[in-house]
Amino acid sequence: MSGYDDFLQTLRRFRSLSVLTVSGGAVVPFFAYLAKISPPWPPGIMILTAIVELLGLIISFQFYKQKSRRIVEKSMIFVVLSLAFTSVVYLSTFSQFTYQAPNASTRSIKGFVCRPEVKLAFSQECPDLTPERLADAQYRAELLWTEWSITIVRMILTLSWLLCCVLLTIFIGIFIVFQGRRR
């Protein structure tokens, strides 16, 4: 039996839990999307998330299939702590640096460095501009913050989101692989 066959057998043996893992890869981002806490950028984030989660499941199987109980337990603790930390980074960045324009269906991303002309006009507020400033700029972040600072926030949001999702998948994947070995 090949490693791939063994991987498929593991998935079949724990069909309900593996369905939770694989579909959990779709369910968690789906519920996040419904709750409007998924990142607003890039547009194809849900497809990217599904691919990254599949990679996490493959990594779990590949690296934890033969590991001892002690290593598996330590790894699971590390993954959960990493997930908690990354979730705090994601949610705090999301909370601080995204906004919803009136009548917009999606959120937009702010920057953290004001454009020079904005800094001159509103030095007391920069970079934490008020909703009124956003309205004055017709909710166009690029008119208020530098492009590079908006890009950095996009990257932090996207990477912390993907890391949260892959860590959750790896945690569930390690559990499935380890429990599948026990008879």
Image (tube, rainbow, N blue to C red):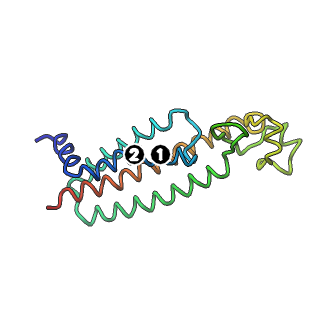
- Give the quadrant of residue 113: top right
Residue type at mark 1: give it.
Pro
**Where is mark 1, residue-wise?**
29
Left or right of residue 179: residue 73: right
Residue type at mark 2: give it.
Gly
Using the image as rendered, state which of residue 67 and residue 98 is in the foreground. Answer: 98
Q: Which mark is residue 9?
A: none
Q: How many marks?
A: 2
Name the residue: 14% across, 40% down.
2
Name the residue: 72% across, 40% down.
101
Where, quadrant-wise, is the N terminus in this rendering?
Answer: top left
Name the residue: 55% across, 33% down.
43
Dot 1 alpha-carbon crowd within 10 angstroms: few under 14, some 14 to 19, many 20 or more: many
Residue ranking furthest to the right:
121
Where, quadrant-wise, is the C terminus in this rendering?
Answer: bottom left
Left or right of residue 97: residue 176: left
Q: CA distance from mark 2 to mark 1?
A: 7 Å
- Give the quadrant of residue 22: top left
Residue 25's spot in the image, x, y percent?
39, 45
User: Are the residues tagged 2 and 1 within 8 Å (C-beta)?
Assistant: yes
Using the image as rendered, state which of residue 55 and residue 43 is in the foreground. Answer: 43
Name the residue: 29% across, 58% down.
175
Q: Secondary structure at mark 1?
A: helix
**Where is mark 2, residue-wise?**
25
Residue 62's spot in the image, x, y percent?
26, 47
